[in-house]
Amino acid sequence: MARTEIPGAGGAWAHALPLARDPIGLANRLRDQGPVVPMKVGWARIFLLNAPAAVRRVLVDNVGPYRKRTRGYDKLRMSLGNGLVTSEGDFWLRQRRIAQPAFRKKALAGFAGIMARRALHTADRLAERAQQGPVDVVGPLNRMALEIVAEALFGAEVDGLADDIERGVSDLVEPFWLYTTALYPRPELVPRPLNWRFWRSRRAMRRAMRRLVTEARRRPDDARDLISMLMTARDPETGEAMSDAQLIDEGLTLVGAGHETTANAMAFGLDLLARHPAVVERVAAEVDEVLGDAAGPDAGQILALRYTRQVVDEILRLHPPVWMLARSVHEDDVLCDVPIPARSYVLVSVYSIHRDPALWTDPERFDPDRFAPDAPTPDRGAYLPFSRGRRQCIGDRFALMEAVCALGLLCRRFTMAPDGPPPVLKPALTLRTRGPIRVRLTPR
């Protein structure tokens, strides 16, 4: 009987349509039903994890049975390739060992100058637009994040490709949630304009990445962009290097997923800052104190912007770019006394956990001081903007440096006020906004 019901109307399909149309709202509604909630989506057995203990077990303490063999990751592999975000098993471990040195603190310090220069240039762009009235900050911040990650990854010569990369990445990530939640297995093969754009952009992006990797092969061995570091790095256990095909996948992953996450977080962050002018003033005062007469910070000064980092941490709590995590279950397990059978799936709604009143005091309030040095440390399963465990995002330090640098410099440059209601959420590959985020920016 269950399979004859209309999807979303009740019974075994009760959660299918809400999961496709409003996954965050559904997760918020199910949050109070227990630490592990079975979901009704037809023949797929899916469990929503709401308790930090369950999240820790899946992501940190017992990762073996929980893998990235889900429809969502299949669609992401189709979009961005088999990079660090999507790969599994021994292949992922090898890639991670090769890539890890390029993302250590010492290596990342060399990119602070790129971040500061691009942020200052973006501030100039925003100042020009602000002369005409309120500014939609989504586009400029997206372009800034793309320029930062592209220059750090490939070097300054990528500037001429920025428009094509920005458009191509958007076409690749826009249909992600539609592809993931469709009731039929290959929605990307249906002849329709959205899919034509997807496949055209996929081919174009891979051609662009192949060209950039080929050009990087010709550079000196001491080049300090990320792709050159990845190219010259070797697996410390086997001595192997990445092939061109693997470099293309990693480059596409870093450009595609990397700039989207940071750009969206900063756009939501400027809206929050515009609604909390006292926080803007406190950030601006800290930046003035740390930088003095310097136009932009170096890596050490970015680390010294401790309150600004608290602001970024709170932005990521309220608007986590990676808003949902999924795993397939390959061995029977038990989470919070609930049996989890093999061949089922678990979902972690990062967004709803970050706003759970059982875990956070006054969770809807924007309060950077909840991350102050003397504040209680959040549970590892209650705060996970970059996931947790060994699959935690390899680019987390890069993203945090970029956001602290950029938002700090923008608060130093402008006073801010909102222009319109808070943004409407659009869950896609990352947490986006359905419309503009308009802010009144006044140069200091």
Image: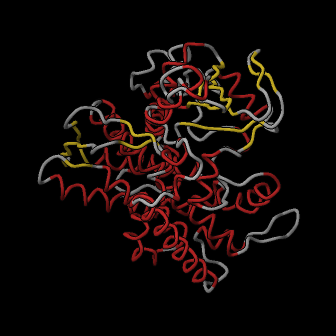
| Depicted 113 relative to depicted 317: above or below | below
Query: Where does the image place residue 70, in percent across and percent down from the top left?
Result: 67, 44
Q: Work out whether residue 248 or residue 29 is closer to the camera in this orientation and state it.
A: 29
Identify which residue is drawn at 57% across, 70% down: 225
Report the side of 166 relative to 273 (left or right).
Answer: right
Residue situated furthest right in the rendering: 238
Report the side of 280 relative to 29 (left or right).
Answer: left
| Depicted 157 relative to depicted 13: above or below | below
Residue 326 figure quarter: top right
Identify which residue is drawn at 52% across, 50% down: 399
Identify which residue is drawn at 58% across, 60% down: 80
Residue 147 visible from this viewpoint: no
Report the side of 165 relative to 209 (left or right).
Answer: left
Q: Work out whether residue 309 or residue 225 is closer to the camera in this orientation and state it.
A: 225
Quadrant of the frame with the N terminus: top right
Q: How is the image coloured?
A: secondary structure
